[in-house]
Image (cartoon, rainbow, N blue to C red):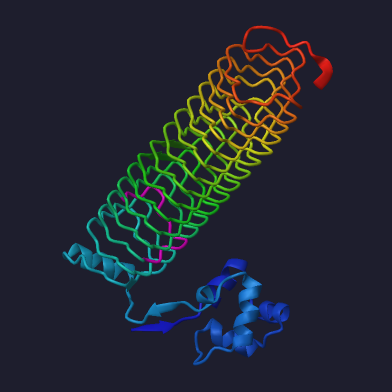
Amino acid sequence: MKKIRCNLKNLMDKKQLSQYQLGKETGLSINAIGRLYREEFDRIDCNTAEVLCNYFGCDLCELFPLKAVSSMRMLGSEFRKRYADGERDFFEVDLSESDLSGLCLTDLNLTGAILYKVIFRNTNLSNANLDKADLRETDLEGATLNGASLKSAKLGEANLQTAKLIYAELVDADLSGACLQNSELQWANLSGAILKTAKLHNAKILRANLRKVDLTNAELSKAELRWVDLREAKLINANLSNAELEANCLVGADLNSANLSNANFNKTDLSNANLSHANVTKTNFSNTKLDYANLSLTNLTLAKFNNACLVGANLRDCNLGGCNLSGTNLSNADLTNVNLRSAVLKDANLSCSTMKFADFKYADLLGANISGVNLDDTYLEGATMPDGSIHDDFSNT
C-alpha cells in the first residue's frame, strides 16, 4: 500500500527557509505550511500546491510523492545487529540519516529502501540490490558498489567520490547533481540515467553503457571514457575539456555548446551528432567519423581532423582557417560560407560538396577530389589546386 507524502520539509531545509519566511514570500498561511511541513494533512489544496511547485521549481510528484507506507523505520544500531545475525533482506527499510560507514554489507536486499542522507563512507555494498532506493544526498565516498543493482534509484546530490561502481546496474537512475569525481564505472550500465550537472571530473568510465544518458551541464573534465556506448546521449553544455574519449560511439549524441577543448575523440563515431556552437579548441578528431554531423557555427580553427570522415556533414559558417584536413572525407558536405583560408586539404575528398561563398584563399588542395563541385562563388585566391597549380584568377575574390 502507498500513501501520498509531503516533501515540503526537505525542500525548505535545502533553502534553509523557516515557515515564517516561506509564508511571507508565498503569501500562504503559516497554518497551511505547518500542516504540510509536519505531514498532518488529509487533503491537498490545488492553489497551495501550485504556489509551492512554482516557488521551488518542482513538479507536483516531487512535492507530494507517492510512497509505500510499509517502510519500516530502523535505527542504525538495530540494522547492524540484524546484519551481523545473518539477516540480508531489508526490503523498503527506512534508515534515513544513519551512520553505516566502514562496514561490509555485501549481498544486501535494500530494494525500495529509504536511505536519505545515510553515511556509507568506505562501506562495501558489493552485489547489493538497491533498485528504486532513495539515496538522495547519501554519502558514499570511497564505497564499493561493484556488481550492485541501482536501477531507477534516486541518487540526486549523492557523494560518490572515489566510489567503485564496476559492473554496477544504474539503468534509469537519477544522479542529478551527484559527485562522482575519481569514481570507477568500468562496465557499468547507466542506460537512460539522468546525470544533469553531475561532477565526473577524472572519473574512469571504460566499456560502459551510457546510451541515452542525460549529461546536460555535467562536469567531465579530464574524465576517461573509452569504448563507451554514448549513442543519443545528451551532453548539452557539458564540460569535456581534456577528456579522453577514444573509440567511443556517440552516434546521434547532442553536444550543443559543449566544451570539448583539448579532448581526444580519436577513432570515435560521431555520426549524426550535434556539435553546433561547441568549443573545439585543439580538439583531436583524427580518424573520427563525423558523417552527417552538425558542426554549424563552430570555431574549428585549432581542431585536428587528419583522416576524419565528414561525409554529408553540416559545416555552414564554420571557421576552419589553417586547419589540417589532409585525407579527410568531406564528400557531400555543406561548406556554405565556411572559412578554410590557409587550410591543408591534401588528398581530401570534397566531391559533390556545397561550397557557395566558401573561402579557400591560400588553402592547399593538392591531390584533393573536387569532382562534382561548383566552384562558382568560391574564393580561391592563391590556393594550391589539386593539380599543383596556383589559382591566380582574382575575379571571385
| Spot occupied by residue 344 in the image (x, y as percentages of width and height) | 63, 16
Q: Position of residue 282 (x, y in %)?
A: 61, 26
Query: Residue 338: where, in percent of width, then height?
Result: 70, 30
Above or below, 368 relative to 23: above
Quadrant for residue 319, please give it.
top right
Q: Nearer the viewer, residue 24 or 174?
A: 174
The residue at the far bottom in this view is 42
Question: Which residue appears at 81% of the width and 21% of the height?
Answer: 396
Q: Quadrant of the C terminus?
A: top right
Q: Determine the main secondary structure of the stretch shown in magenta.
A: loop
Residue 201 position, x and y percent, is 50, 41
Q: In the rendered image, which quarter is residue 239 located in?
A: top right
Query: Looking at the picture, does residue 336 appear above or below residue 212?
Result: above
Which region shows up in magenta?
133-145
Using the rendered view, name the quadrant where residue 281 is placed. top right
Q: Is residue 149 above or below residue 29?
A: above
Task: Say if the magenta span includes residue 141.
Answer: yes
In this figure, what is the number of numbered marks? 0
Question: Viewed as shown, does residue 392 lie left or right of 246?
Answer: right
Q: Residue at x 31, y 72 (%)?
A: 93
In this rendered view, identify the residue nearer to me: 377 or 218. Answer: 377
Q: Is residue 320 magenta?
A: no
Left or right of 296 on screen, residue 197: left
Q: Quadrant of the N terminus?
A: bottom left
Q: Nearer the viewer, residue 46 or 70?
A: 46
Residue 17 at least partly seen: no
Q: Is residue 317 visible?
A: yes
| Residue visible at 73% across and 14% down in the picture | 362
